[in-house]
């Protein structure tokens, strides 16, 4: 009798618990589209570049017109704040109806969300209809994000690669290696600088130097530790020490971001700038922000590259709508528009040669821009270090050089 009574209590308690709806199943795409129709989704994405904001607005309009999903672009300055928002919701027990439906992430933010269980728990991105054309073979970072396996928990959206650019009217033959750049800085004092870490572009430059200079780059694919940090980074900081007094304003101050550095190039205060998008120089020329004599280049040994992604948090209110937008963002139509230098110039994640003839022709007819390198000219992609190296490098940079700010 007691056992029956106890079993009854357990059954009642279980019945009283809220039942969470099953997550949308991309293998049943028609059901996903039906569930998404009428949803309003809040897409949290960096809002610091007007051309990107315009592209997101275009994509949102397309998704609403075709699938009935309204997209609200929540412009953020730092994606880490989005991670914190979802983590706070989880700590408060808000496992449904979350404020973030889709987030633009990669690197350490993805690693943090995966580690803390803040993403949809089952692979979904690799099961989206558009994923079949993603270039997994030649773009390994679509499956491994800063050494962390993606496991289908985020949808690849675009490629990024460090690109340098210079004004050919003032500098004909730029240095094309870390070692050559160090010599050039010494011979041309005041003509080079980089954004102040922890600005993303500034930190990316430090990672480029680190990969080129460290005795064993393979070490960077694992976690940074007290034991390996010094031996791996000593050559980096020796390079920075040697360069510091010959930097712009003798290294006493640094531009705050890429746009500020680009303006220094436009004003002929520095001779070289860099970005993480191959079309940056072409876009700036088209917008009259740089002279049309500016051209792009990469280091002969390769430059840092990665993939950026779209992810659905585990507690998103509009999971189906988030999947629909992510799938559209990976479509050939959206990808070719995104790679158009007049729109954004962000490289595609797709294997263009595998696309249907009509879509392939659209990519092949793209005008990449006057200063944009062709895909075959971009050179090798250097993989991102494990995300644990970033904070340590930034902290050590601040300790050594931050007092001069």
Image (cartoon, rainbow, N blue to C red):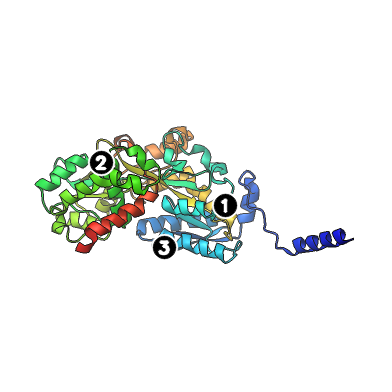
**Which residue is painted at 82% across and 61% down in the image?**
6
Q: Secondary structure at mark 1?
A: loop
Q: Answer yes or no: do the residues labelled 1 and 2 have beta carbons within 8 Å?
A: no
* Residue toward you, 340 or 243: 243
For residue 267, what is the image quadrant? bottom left
Please tell me whether residue 172 is drawn above or below residue 18 in the rendered image.
above
Front-lying residue, 156 or 51: 156
Residue 56 in the image: x percent, y percent?
A: 44, 56
Q: Residue at x 56, y 62 (%)?
A: 90
Residue underneath mark 1 = 120
Label 2 element class: helix
Q: Which mark is in front, 1 or 3?
A: 1
Spatial CA distance of label 1 from label 2 is: 38 Å
Residue in the foreground of this view, choosing between 362 and 393: 393
Which residue matches tag 3?
76
Residue 184's x, y, as percent?
13, 44
**Snapshot quadrant of residue 67:** bottom right
Q: Quadrant of the C terminus?
A: bottom left
Q: Secondary structure at mark 3?
A: strand
Q: Earlier in the sequence, mark 1 or mark 3?
A: 3
- Compare marks 1 and 2 and give the one earlier in the sequence: 1
Checking the image for residue 262, the label placed there is none
Q: CA distance from mark 2 to mark 3?
A: 34 Å
Q: Which mark is residue 213?
A: 2
Residue 196 screen position, x and y as percent: 26, 58
């Amino acid at each position: 009798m007691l056992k029956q009574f106890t079993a009854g209590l357990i059954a009642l308690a279980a019945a009283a618990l809220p039942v969470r709806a099953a997550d949308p199943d991309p293998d049943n795409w028609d059901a996903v589209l039906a569930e998404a129709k009428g949803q309003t989704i809040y897409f949290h994405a960096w809002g610091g570049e007007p051309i990107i904001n315009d592209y997101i607005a275009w994509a949102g309009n397309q998704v609403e017109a075709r699938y009935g999903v309204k997209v609200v672009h929540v412009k953020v300055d730092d994606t880490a704040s989005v991670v914190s928002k979802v983590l706070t919701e989880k700590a408060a027990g808000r496992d449904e109806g979350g404020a973030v439906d889709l987030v633009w992430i990669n690197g350490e933010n993805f690693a943090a969300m995966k580690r803390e269980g803040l993403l949809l728990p089952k692979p979904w991105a690799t099961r989206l209809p558009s994923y079949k054309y993603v270039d997994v073979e030649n773009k390994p970072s679509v499956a491994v994000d800063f050494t962390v396996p993606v496991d289908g928990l985020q949808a690849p959206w675009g490629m990024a690669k460090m690109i340098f650019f210079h004004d050919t009217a003032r500098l004909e033959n730029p240095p094309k290696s870390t070692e050559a750049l160090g010599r050039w800085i010494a011979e041309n004092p005041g003509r080079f600088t980089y954004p102040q870490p922890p600005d993303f572009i500034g930190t990316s430059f430090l990672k480029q130097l680190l990969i080129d200079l460290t005795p064993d780059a393979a070490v960077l694919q694992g976690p940074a530790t007290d034991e390996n940090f010094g031996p791996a980074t000593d050559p980096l900081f020796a390079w920075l020490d040697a360069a510091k007094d010959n930097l712009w304003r003798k290294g006493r101050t640094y531009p705050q971001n890429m746009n500020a550095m680009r303006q220094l190039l436009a004003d002929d205060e520095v001779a070289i700038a860099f970005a993480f998008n191959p079309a940056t120089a072409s876009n700036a020329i088209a917008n009259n922000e740089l002279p049309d004599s500016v051209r792009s280049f990469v280091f002969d040994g390769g430059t840092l590259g990665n993939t950026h992604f779209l992810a659905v948090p585990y507690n998103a209110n509009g999971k189906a709508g988030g999947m629909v937008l992510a799938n559209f963002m990976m479509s050939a139509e959206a990808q070719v528009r995104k790679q158009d230098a007049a729109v954004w110039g962000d490289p595609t994640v797709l294997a263009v040669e595998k696309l249907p003839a009509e879509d392939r022709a659209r990519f092949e007819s793209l005008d990449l821009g006057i200063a944009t390198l062709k895909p075959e000219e971009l050179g090798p992609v250097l993989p991102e270090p494990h995300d644990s190296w970033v904070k340590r490098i930034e902290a050590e940079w601040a300790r050594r050089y931050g007092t001069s700010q």
